[in-house]
Image (cartoon, helix red, strand yellow):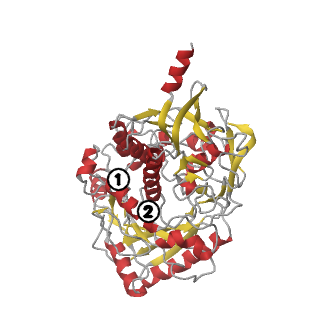
Amino acid sequence: MSFLTIDSIKDRTFDAIVVGSGISGGWAAKELTGKGLRTLVLERGRDVKHITDYPTTLMQPWEFAHLGQLSKEYIEANPVASRCYANREDATHFFVQDAEHPYVQEKPFDWIRGYHVGGKSLMWARGTQRWSEYDFEGPARDGFAVDWPIRYADLAPWYSYVEKFAGISGNKDGLSVLPDGEFLPPHEQSCVEKHFSDQMAKQYKGTRPVIIGRCAHLTKPQPIHYQQGRAQCQNRSLCQRGCPYGGYFSSNSSTLPWAAKTGKMTLRPDSVVHSIIYDEKLGKASGVRVVDAHTKQMTEYYAKIIFLNAACLNTNLVLLNSKSNRFPSGLGNDNGLLGKYVAFHNFRTTISAEHEGFQDSTTAGIRPNGSYIPRFRNVLKQETDFLRGYAAGFGSSRPTSVDTSAMGEDLKSSLMQPKYGNWRVSSHMMGETIPKESNYVALDSVLTDAWGIPQLKISVAYDDNDEKMIADFHEQMTEMLTVSGFTNIRTHDKPDKAPGLDIHEMGGVRMGKDPKTSMLNKWNQLHNCKNVFVTDGACMTSTSTQNPSLTFMAITARAADHAVKEMKRGML
């Protein structure tokens, strides 16, 4: 009997464990298996296989019961998930059901989650910009929050590394605030976007560029992408369904199958991680406790190193729930900072306008990307009464209208000759929120989920800095659109819109130089438990104005490289 026990433990022992299979978890799996480590990848949700598990990807609009719209019943049952911009009738199967995964909103917060293999890498908007030196210097420059332990130069080679593999389209714009990368050919701006870009260059002398967005779409696949089994983006703009062509980067189409080809990866879906096991004799983590999603049976798995990539807030939850005699308030939490200094991006407000020119032009086809206005406020000096700044998305379209009042041939003729209206443009703000101790997550002391794990209590809100930034965005964008000849300019703010719908939550397990003021060192290791690495959004010290996913990828690849080197040196 004892031999059976020994064999069972051996079967549950790996070189590395990765918790989570989303964007950062997929990269951890790829890097660790690629360097020869037998790696267990744990995913709390169901399996989703590339192509075969995208059930709506080739469906036509008329094949949906509600023509693509969410039903009244779904919205009433899922008030949080239904508010997400990407959640339509063709994608509801990738969003968690509100009732099945409850959490405590100490303050209103829309927590958007995708519990399945691939996680939110199947649901993201695919914006992929590098962070700049200004972003990593931000906290040190204005003295708010702690200094990052790394700078842009530390990540630059890893940005290049992940960009070449993932496939990022963009234009080399030569902007210090938005470093160039290893780009595939860019998408093309519309004539109105080019006009706005030209006007900004003329009116603001190059200080407020309007560029084509940088995104994770294969505009011209390279041999490394074909080796992954991926093909060119078809510009369908049905990305939320899962892309059967692998036209955009996801864990399912790229990093996970690449890791599987090594023969070193064991993928275990339906595995809800309860906590990390801390061995007090060894002075380090020895494995994880996992609850089977269906049987509710708990099993332990063991490894020398653990990468925690459960997505920002769930990573906080797992660490908070990893209690031991050594760490009674959560793994590595000697300083009491675990779960604190959570921040996000402020997407609360938009602005729209029209342009009466370019009546002889319209768009052709679809483009899964938009234009982008990099941060221009408080870059070289503090020039406003709020900290940090904002970037903005910018898009254009020319709507059509059709007279459907006729019948027969007249109706057919009318349908074939739609009338074009004026060009319309819109822009959404992407504001950097400031990490604060008062924005935190914690475990509820009473409520648990279906797997016996404490529910997460979220207490995150906007502050006065965010309100000032919104007002400045309205003022500056109105001025920029006015001098560029746009009319009917309207601002749209939703003060009652809760944080969370940006899906860019970061922090709670922040990096830093000092164990007294941070949770992780410059290699993403817990200061007080060196064989546990956190490389998803939870590790972020501040939030920049750029999308964070590319930085998650680069940080993960860098940390995995360090972890393997340390293992070989016998230091982990």
Badge 2: how crowded within 10 Å, few (<14), some, or many (20+)?
Answer: some
Indicate the quadrant containing the N terminus: top left, top right, bottom left or bottom right. Answer: top right
Q: Amino acid at mark 1?
A: Ala
* Direction right: furthest residue: 446
Residue 474: horizontal and vertical position, in percent?
A: 55, 75
Q: Nearer the viewer, residue 304 or 380?
A: 304
Q: Nearer the viewer, residue 41 or 208?
A: 41
* Direction front: furthest residue: 569
Would you place residue 416 above or below residue 357 in this image?
above
Residue 336: horizontal and vertical position, in percent?
A: 72, 54
Does residue 142 show up?
A: yes
Tally the marks: 2
Residue 460: horizontal and vertical position, in percent?
A: 67, 57
Q: Amino acid at mark 2?
A: Leu
Label 1–label 2 contact, CB within 8 A: no
* Direction left: furthest residue: 223
Answer with the quarter of the image where residue 423 lies: bottom left
Q: Nearer the viewer, residue 86 or 499?
A: 499
- Determine the residue positioned at 35% across, 81% down: 198
- Determine the residue positioned at 27% across, 63% down: 185
Residue with the mark numbered 1:
166
The label on residue 538 is none
The label on residue 155 is 2
Badge 1: how crowded within 10 Å, few (<14), some, or many (20+)?
Answer: many
- Determine the residue positioned at 23% across, 51% down: 223
Would you place residue 393 above or below residue 125 in this image?
below
> Which structural element holds mark 1?
helix
> Which structural element holds mark 2?
helix
